[in-house]
Image (cartoon, rainbow, N blue to C red):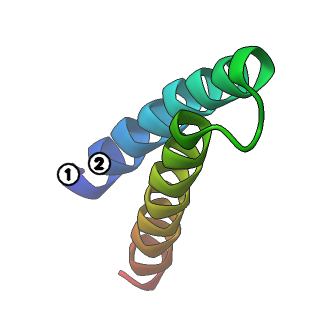
Amino acid sequence: METQKSCCDVVTEINNLRKAMIATGMSKGLNDRETLKYSQELDKLILRWQLILRYQVEC
């Protein structure tokens, strides 16, 4: 149950961060530091989500 909650929380974070990254990219450009920071954070969250799913399936 905790894994499911963690997965849902991470998906919510991913969606929020994706929206922020897109908005920043559109207003400041794709090479702006803030856009790149969002992109890097998003990469980390997506990896975390994939790991949660991987171990959830194996349980």
In this picture, residue 49 sits left or right of residue 22: left
Q: Is residue 7 above or below residue 46?
A: above
Q: Considering the image in quadrants, where does the C terminus appear?
A: bottom left
Residue 30 is tagged as none
Q: Residue at x 40, y 67 (%)?
A: 52
Query: Which quarter of the figure has residue 24?
Result: top right
The residue positioned 55% from the left and 60% from the top of the image is 43
Asked if the residues shown at circle 1 and circle 2 are in contact, with their CB atoms under 8 angstroms apart, the answer is yes
Location of residue 25 with respect to 45 vertically, above or below: above
Residue at image position (52%, 35%) is 34
Front residue of 26/53: it is 26
- Between 41 and 56, the one lying in front of the other is 41
Q: Which residue is mark 1?
A: 2
**CA gap, disc 1 and disc 2:** 6 Å
Mark 1 or mark 2: which is in front? 2
User: What is the crowding at mark 1: few (fewer than 14 residues within 10 Å), some, or many (at least 20)?
Assistant: few
Under mark 1, the amino acid is Glu
Viewer-proximal residue among 11 and 40:
40
Say which residue appears at 57% left-offset and 22% top-offset.
20
* Amino acid identity at mark 2: Ser
The crowd level at tag 2 (other Cα within 10 Å; few <14, some 14-19, many 20+) is some
SS label for mark 1 = helix
Is residue 35 shown above or below 36?
above
The residue that label 2 is drawn on is 6
Q: Quadrant of residue 32?
A: top right
| Residue 23 vertical position relative to residue 50 in the rendered view, above or below | above
Q: Quadrant of residue 29?
A: top right
**x and y, in percent, of residue 58 in the image:** 43, 85
Helix, strand or loop under label 2: helix
Q: Does residue 36 appear left or right of residue 54 in this picture?
A: right
